[in-house]
């Protein structure tokens, strides 16, 4: 009797390896499962995470300079802005797919929500530091400065790890790290010289 094609729960969980053999596999697509929303279920959106870190550090620098004694308010700015940009990216990707011929669906929206989640996740450590300031565990000034430092450290670490993962040459890594450092300097400039 001919074996039936199609995935079974007993198959190996390394999706890229057997997607080429089994044409349809709901186990490989997190959006096909109603219980899988967390971003670790999909290929990581490194670009979204780096964009989120740059966005977050800029918000902390600007809002923190305007409200140096209100870490809680800075955290609200950070979280609300990150959420708005996250939803805007999801909307743009769904709309772009529609223009290209794929009609919007709940499945597509869910997939884009998962794909763009690293943009929000990148704000979690800085937001946690700001929360310490809002709760009075540390001073607001320290919390804001530390949160910005954490965000910039995330940026530099993320770029270095991305270069290593991609097997970048020395010149490629130098350019990438220099660009990240330039973004960091711009954020520091906003904090120190523009807003005071």
Image (cartoon, grey):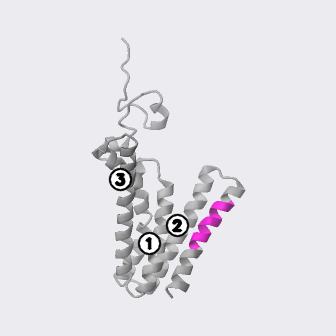
**Residue situated in front as seen by the camera: 154 or 101:** 101
Instruction: Give the quarter of the image for residue 178.
Output: bottom right
Element on which disc 2 rests: helix
The residue sitting at 57% across, 64% down in the picture is: 157
**Residue situated in front as seen by the camera: 178 or 71:** 178
In the rendered view, tell whether residue 27 sits above or below residue 129.
Answer: above
- Range of the magenta residues? 174-184
> Which circle's residue, 2 or 3, is located before the other in the chain?
3
The numbered mark at residue 113 is 3
- Overall secondary structure of the magenta section: helix
> Which circle's residue, 2 or 1, is located before the other in the chain?
1
Instruction: Give the quarter of the image for residue 27.
Output: top left
Work out which residue is located at the far right of the displayed protein and give it: 171
Label 2 – label 1 distance at C-alpha: 9 Å
In the rendered view, tell whether residue 149 sits above or below residue 86.
Answer: below
Label 1 – label 3 distance at C-alpha: 21 Å
**Which residue is labeled 1 in the image?**
126
Q: Is residue 176 magenta?
A: yes
Please say if the residues under marks 2 and 1 sit with CB atoms less than 8 Å apart: yes
Label 2 – label 3 distance at C-alpha: 22 Å
Disc 2 or disc 3, which is closer to the eye?
3
Q: Position of residue 128 (x, y in %)?
A: 40, 72
């Amino acid at each position: 009797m001919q074996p039936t094609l199609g995935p079974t729960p007993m198959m190996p969980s390394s999706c890229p390896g057997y997607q080429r053999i089994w044409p349809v596999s709901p186990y490989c697509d997190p959006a096909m499962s109603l219980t899988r929303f967390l971003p670790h279920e999909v290929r990581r959106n490194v670009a979204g995470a780096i964009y989120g870190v740059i966005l977050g550090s800029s918000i902390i620098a600007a809002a923190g300079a305007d409200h140096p004694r209100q870490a809680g308010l800075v955290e609200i700015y950070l979280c609300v802005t990150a959420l708005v940009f996250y939803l805007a990216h999801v909307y743009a990707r769904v709309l772009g797919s529609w223009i290209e011929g794929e009609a919007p669906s709940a499945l597509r929206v869910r997939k884009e929500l998962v794909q763009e989640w690293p943009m929000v996740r990148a704000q979690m450590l800085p937001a946690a530091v700001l929360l310490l300031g809002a709760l009075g565990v540390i001073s607001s000034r320290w919390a804001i400065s530390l949160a910005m430092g954490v965000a910039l450290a995330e940026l530099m670490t993320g770029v270095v790890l991305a270069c290593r993962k991609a097997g970048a040459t020395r010149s490629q890594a130098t350019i990438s790290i220099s660009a990240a450092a330039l973004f960091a300097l711009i954020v520091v400039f906003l904090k120190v010289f523009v807003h005071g």
